[in-house]
Amino acid sequence: MAHETSGTPDELVLPDNIQDLLAGSLKPADHLVFMHGGNTLMFLIESHPDLFVRLNFENHLEDMEASLNAVHGLREYGVNVPPARAVEHDGEHHTDVYVVTKRIDGRPLVELLAGNADEELLAEVDTTWAGLARNLINSKKERAIPMDVATPEQYMFGVMAGETQPRTWLVDLPEHTEDLNGDDPDAYIEQVLNVANGVAIIQALTGKVMAAAQSALEKAVMLAEDSEEYGDGMANAVKYVIENNVTLYLDGDEDRIVELRTK
């Protein structure tokens, strides 16, 4: 069958023989899995050490294309996302979707934050999570958002192939998107809370206040409507987690969120 690929805004150039490489040249990247996040299988290509490959089970090309387009939109807000392309490949029993990105060599962000992170790194992280919040503000009216990009465990600090400057990178690329204007009336404020949880984790690890991220979250909360089920509890939860460096999630902490409502 004819195989398809989906590009990103900067069109990562793939080898002409990518189908042959996926069929026979992948090497498990076991030692890199903890740094690149996620629960998918991960590989290197022996003849192309600058590339990193992830096998996404049970995903369709169009779904991955939408996710990659959404996550690369985060670049507008100061979030570093490596170029990536989704590639269909005939597996032994079915067609698989691989995501090929540029390789990043470095360390998990949480390890550095738990150590003695310098001011430059802290400022970059603050900018990153402020960008996640600002993306939500604009996406509330304009476009779908990438899911599951707000926890520091999904990031690395390192050097991308072809570059020399280490940066903070989102490496656990999402597989799904969400429309904040869809059927779930709490979708927007839940995503704001997720970003706030990420900020709370960072502040707890570092003992430092992420001022830019907090400011962006305050603006994001102002756009939220009260929930039919939780009133202003979700909005109050955002403030609570970034002030107390704890996490609250809608899935699991519903009772605590209800306790935080004032109307």
Image (cartoon, rainbow, N blue to C red):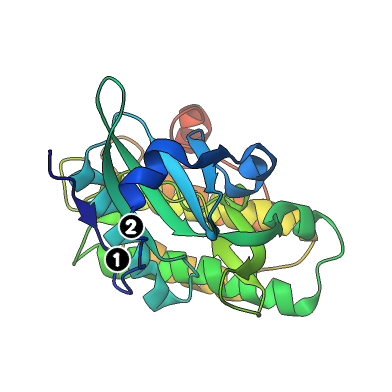
Residue that carries the numbered disc 1 in the rendered image = 8
Q: CA distance from mark 2 to mark 1?
A: 6 Å
**Residue at the spot 48% in from the left edge and 76% down from the top edge:** 78
Q: Is residue 164 left or right of residue 74?
A: right
Q: Nearer the viewer, residue 104 or 123?
A: 104
**From the viewer's perspective, is residue 41 above or below residue 106?**
above
Instruction: Find numbered disc 2 in the image and state the secondary structure of the residue it sits on.
Output: strand
Q: Amino acid at mark 1?
A: Thr
**Residue identifier under label 2:** 85
Dot 2 alpha-carbon crowd within 10 angstroms: few under 14, some 14 to 19, many 20 or more: many
- What percent of the width, then of the height, locates residue 105? 66, 61
Q: Are marks 2 and 1 in contact (CB under 8 Å)?
A: yes
**Where does residue 44 sit, x and y in percent of width and height?**
55, 47
Residue occupying image coordinates x 44% and y 51%: 173
**Residue 172 visible in the shown view:** yes
Residue type of the residue flagged with mark 2: Arg
Q: Is residue 236 visible?
A: no
Q: Earlier in the sequence, mark 2 or mark 1?
A: 1
Residue 231 or residue 171, whichever sits in front: 171
Question: Which residue is at a point 65% across and 48% down the rendered structure image?
Answer: 35
